[in-house]
Every structure is written in structure tokens, then in C-alpha cells.
Image: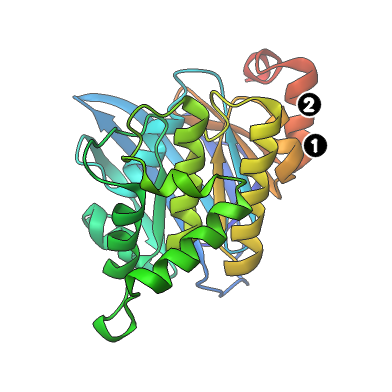
Amino acid sequence: MCPTLSKNAAGRNQRGQTMIKINKNNSSNSQLEICDLHVEVEGTEIIKGVSLTFHSGKVHALMGPNGSGKSTLANALMGHPKYKITQGKIVLDGKDITKEKADVRAKAGLFLSFQYPAEVQGVTISNFLRTAVNNFKPKEDQLSVIDFHKLLQEKMASLKMDSSFSRRYLNAGFSGGEKKRAEILQMLLLEPKYALLDESDSGLDVDAIKTVAEGINVARESTQAGIIVITHYHKFLQFLKPDEVSILYKGKIIAQGGYELAQRIEKEGFEVMINDQ
């Protein structure tokens, strides 16, 4: 089992890596832990020793400039085969899932909202989501078409989506904002333990950002899911008020704190923290 990590960096080791304080008194297994994770993409190391803990019912914002490794970290956590873990481990609620395939991780409670969702012609939103939801349930608990339709309409209403949306083909011809809402709709229906949201605010106007953030907050409150939000911008976080914020730069965590850290970035930018290293 991984050690339980606190949110504040305690300093640096001789290799220049951020060191994290260990809380040995916390025995709770209800958390997603990353322990000294190193990740390569096509032979190049992108993530260089990241240790983080994400807690149930909390929002954790992962920020950093372009090319810092945020999406790489999310894909590695989800088990994408392109992202090779060369060192470290991932522990979900006390279970080591480092070597598990993506479908096993999903059934264990992980969810990834893609930055660029794929378009699938010929498969409606409704059919896709009903298949996904029932795949997570034992046969006797699977939803009928009628029961799922009622549930789907309820979740769509919470995201202010028109009822006709469910009849459209998955992401086909969707605007950027529609794709992001469709991803959050999946999260609301699948009710994961931990949701990795990769730039869910990208391409959205202010009203849509607020609506998506409200959907995320509903998911957190109703299921006590741990939410990991990857974003460049403070505006999205204004509606989410993250409990913890971590700054990733060149594959390493360079700063950690609460919501005030995101507010500082909004005023000063990432360069101030990068220059402090």
C-alpha cells in the first residue's frame, strides 16, 4: 500500500524532486494514490516522479502550462497503453492497479473525460450510454430502455441539455461545448469513484462553463466522487472551488496548496512559480 501523502510539499531531495510529507496516522483506504510515478511516451520520459493523493468527495485541480504532462498523467492513470509506467505505482482504495488494463480500472471506479472525444457515427448517445451503464451492473440490476430513458432525461436536464440530444450520434458534428457536456453526462450516469476531467472547460463560453461545473458539483455531492480537474484557467475553478491545487511543470509537482494557489496563478501566472524553482 502507498503511504498517505499530505498536500503540502516539504522540500526537495538531492535529485531536485519535490518531496511530500507523509501522514502516517491516516489509515483510510478511500483515496486514489500516485506514488513516485514515472511515465514514458515513445521512449521519452514525461512524468518524472509524481506523488499525489486524491480524496473521495474532494475536488483536486491539476494545473500547469502547456506541455507540463497533465494529460499524460491522466492517461497513464487510466491505463492507456501508449503511456508506459516505468516506475512507481497507482493505488485505488488500497488496491494496487498499476498493471491493470483500462477496463479493469474503469470497473474499479476510475473515469477519464477526454480532452478530444472521438466521434462515432451510427451510435446514438442513448444507446452508447445505456450499454456503458449496464456494463457496470449485474444482470439482475440492468436498466430497461424505459427506465434508462427516464434516468438519462433527468441527468440531461441537470446539464441543461435538450432532450433531443440523446438521439444524436456520439460526438458526431458536436461543437466543442457539446462534446464536453456529453463527457460530463457520462460521468453523471456512470458514477465513478474518481473522475479525471481533462480540460472540461476547453471551448466553452462562460455560461456553459458554469453549467458543466454545476454538473460536476452534483456528481461530487450525490456520489462523493473524487474529482481531478485538469485546467489552465482559474475561471472554471471559480465555480468548483477546489479543495486542493497542484502545479505540474516539466513532469514534476512544483507547488501545492488550496484554492488560493489557483487565485495566485490567475494574478501572477505560472512564470512566478517556475522562476522560484
Q: Which mark is residue 264?
A: 2
Relative to 142, 82 lies left or right: left
- The residue shown at (19%, 24%) is 42
- The residue shown at (32%, 42%) is 76
- The residue shown at (75%, 22%) is 266
Is residue 192 visible in the rendered image? The answer is: no
User: Pointer 1: residues within 10 angstroms few (<14), some, or many (20+)?
Assistant: some
Question: Colour scheme used in the picture?
Answer: rainbow
User: Pointer 2: residues within 10 angstroms few (<14), some, or many (20+)?
Assistant: some
Find numbered disc 2 in the image and state the secondary structure of the residue it sits on.
Answer: helix
Seen in the picture, residue 23 relative to 210 is either above or below; the reply is below
Seen in the picture, residue 225 relative to 251 is either above or below; the reply is below
Find numbered disc 1 in the image and state the secondary structure of the residue it sits on.
Answer: helix
- Horizontal and vertical percent position of residue 22: 59, 57
Quarter of the image where one finds residue 43:
top left
Q: CA distance from mark 2 to mark 1?
A: 6 Å
Given the image, on which type of amino acid does mark 2 rest?
Arg
- Horizontal and vertical percent position of residue 14: 49, 32
Q: Nearer the viewer, residue 127 or 110?
A: 127
Q: Nearer the viewer, residue 33 or 112?
A: 112
Seen in the picture, residue 260 relative to 65 is either above or below; the reply is below
Q: Are marks 2 and 1 in contact (CB under 8 Å)?
A: yes
Q: Which residue is mark 1?
A: 260
Seen in the picture, residue 174 relative to 113 is either above or below; the reply is above
Q: Nearer the viewer, residue 18 or 206?
A: 206
- Horizontal and vertical percent position of residue 245: 66, 40
Given the image, on which type of amino acid does mark 1 rest?
Glu
Quarter of the image where one finds residue 270:
top right
Is residue 168 visible in the rendered image? The answer is: yes
Q: Which mark is residue 180?
A: none
Relative to 186, 27 lies left or right: right
